Image (tube, coloured by chain):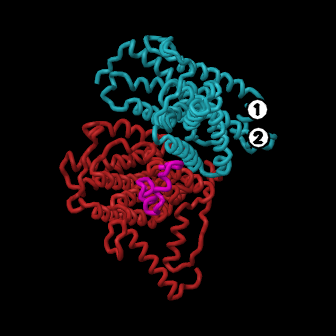
Amino acid sequence: MIVAVTLSELSRVLVLGVVNGAIYSLIAIGLVLVYKASGVFNFAQGEFGTVAIYGAYLSVTILHLPYGVALIVGLAAALGMGLLTERLIIRPLFDAPRVTLLVATAGIALLAIGVEFWRTANNPLRFFDAIVDSPSSLDRVSPFGVAVSDQRLITLLVLAVAAFLLYLFFRSPLGLAVLAASQEPVASELVGVSVRRISTITWGLASLLGGAAGLLYAGGAQFSPGLITAAVLIPGFTAAIVGGITSLPGAAAGGILVGILQALGSLSTFESIKGASFVSVFVVLLIVLLVRPQGLFVGRST
Amino acid sequence: MTAAPTGTGWAARVVVGASLAWVVLCYPTNVLSPFTVAGVEANAASEAVIFAVIGLSLNVLIGYIGSISLGHQAFVGIGAFTSAYVVTEMGQEFWIAAVVAALVGAAQAALLGAVSLRVTGLYFGLITLSYGIMTQESIFQIESLTGGTAGQAAPRPIGFESDFRYYYLCLVVLGLVVFLDWRLIATKGGRALLALRENPRVAATWGINVKAYTVLAFGVSGLFAGLGGALLAHRDTNVVANPFGLNLALVFILMTVIGGLRNRAGVVVGAAFFALLRNGELLELLRVDSVFAKDPISLTAEVMPLVLGPVLLLLTITIFPGGFGQLTSTIGRWLRGGSFRFVRAEKEVQNTDVRA
């Protein structure tokens, strides 16, 4: 196979990768937050997004709420799901093996997917409007000839704002308490940090991030049960691993990187390989975990 | 041990044991029945038996060595496609194809096992998850190997074309797998596996070759899964890539965990339960299929395990750690002449006391 890639194709891939990667970053940041707080790989992180989509979709179609309110309802649905998961599943299993917790969160995700399938069985494909809904919103901006919709631009903006807010949060007393509780739960308890409250806060934050990712991803496109779990969860996990699983900036950068790598799989050179973007994600995950399990952006000393 | 049962006690045990054997051996195929039963379809029952094989395969990983596999649908799918390929494209007999499928399944699982030596715990779960998706989206789409979207034909072996004969074939394979699984656990290797699940470092200090036994467990799991895949392929007489998605992997996890890890009978019952729930036979059998199909509920059989399964899973994990295995072991103890006593399984606790 001759690797022949034109410059224009490469730049197209870069733009696509960054745009798609922003969603992975949002999910990955949520995964890292939960991992720091509970030591759990949260397989329900993607489902927070799908539940938010259904919440927003239902409030538009059934309750006839305005779009902005519907987005808030969607986020609230994701938040509720996150807090319930934390209270009903994570807390009772505090000292269970981590693999059991992984299975439990996968169970939560599957339950949500099952209910979505069940209630939409007659017509599983639904459409959710974009935030900016006009014909020109699809290709107002087109770097290197790639049309980037307003929805994707807003996604990048939300990612930047979320990153900035989290940066501020982890410099506030509450944020420092979260960091302390994730490193030494017993010692933090002794100096008066309520580890339970911290756990609730982190799960709340993570579910909001997941919900936002879902709403941004689905806007202007068709969605179906389990969409975010199927489309974003594995790249999101890969992004979190690439970033070193405990580093928030690493997760954000990892998302973009995984987006680009996945877009590389869609190059015409690899056309003969079926599902090349799935192969590229698997290979990246495997190589990073085998060769550099501490993540690409983290020094060896930690 | 309580006092030995009386004569009536033994009679009751024999009657119950015989009816259980009748339900498994005769009910699905409607032979040797004192009355005609519009029972489970033999094909659906075959699926239940095949799922039991797959459940035992997953039990080796999750139960015995504590390694999660979220890509088990790929293990099964590889077995299915290998067997179909050997029969259709290479013109071999089913029996050879099934052995090849089992060996290929074992080989790919052993490779993953080698990875699991370096990447453990949750991280390994991610690897298997990604591996499963990649296999379905990429390898199973290669037209020359799997026939692409049309799928690969997988005719049944000569003499087993009818549904009920094929059911007995599946039962024989399940018997073989149960026997192998029992020998694995009852011997030195099994004790080594259980020790290394508890704590690999302590196991290593006892002179257990942790690496070799881990790879062995993966190989055995892949062997079972490959066999299950071959049976599944030839039951449907055609294999396509589409069903081997993440949902199937999650159903496998559900049935194994709810069945009760490290409990052979429990896993078999759990797997059969989910297979029959999936193809709607269980509801039909209980005459409640129309209740669920009606308008306000309108819960179809395909969705049923996705809604009911996670609820059972979360209950199993949080409140009832033994799963179905607690019930089956109670019944089993009673059948062997013990008392009908319910023993709660211990909750597993994260092992943090030994650090290196």
Q: Is residue B289 magenta?
A: yes
Q: Residue furthest bottom?
A: B7
Residue sitting at x 67%, y 36%: A204
Q: Which mark is residue A188?
A: 2
Disc 2 vs disc 1: which is toward the camera?
A: 1
Q: Which residues are magenta?
A: B275-299
Q: Which mark is residue B320?
A: none
Residue sitting at x 33%, y 69%: B30
Specify the chain shown as cyan: A
Q: Is residue B336 above or below residue A20?
A: below
Q: Are marks 2 and 1 on the same chain?
A: yes
Q: Which residue is mark 1?
A: A174
Q: Is residue B260 above or below residue B23?
A: above
Indicate the secondary structure of the residue bearing disc 2: helix
Q: Position of residue B3 (x, y in %)?
A: 58, 85
Most foreground residue, A157 or B277? B277
Most foreground residue, B153 or B146? B153
Q: Position of residue B267 (x, y in %)?
A: 47, 60
Residue at mark 1: chain: A
Specify the chain shown as red: B
Q: CA distance from mark 2 to mark 1?
A: 12 Å
Q: Is residue A102 left or right of residue A192?
A: left
What amino acid type is highlighted by mark number 2? Ser
Where the C terminus of chain A falls, by quadrant?
top right
Q: Is residue B132 left or right of residue B356?
A: left
Q: Is residue B317 magenta?
A: no
Residue at mark 2: chain: A
Mark nearer the N terminus (2 vs 1)? 1
Indicate the secondary structure of the residue bearing disc 1: helix
Residue sitting at x 45%, y 67%: B186
Where the N terminus of chain A falls, by quadrant?
top left
Q: Residue furthest left?
A: B91
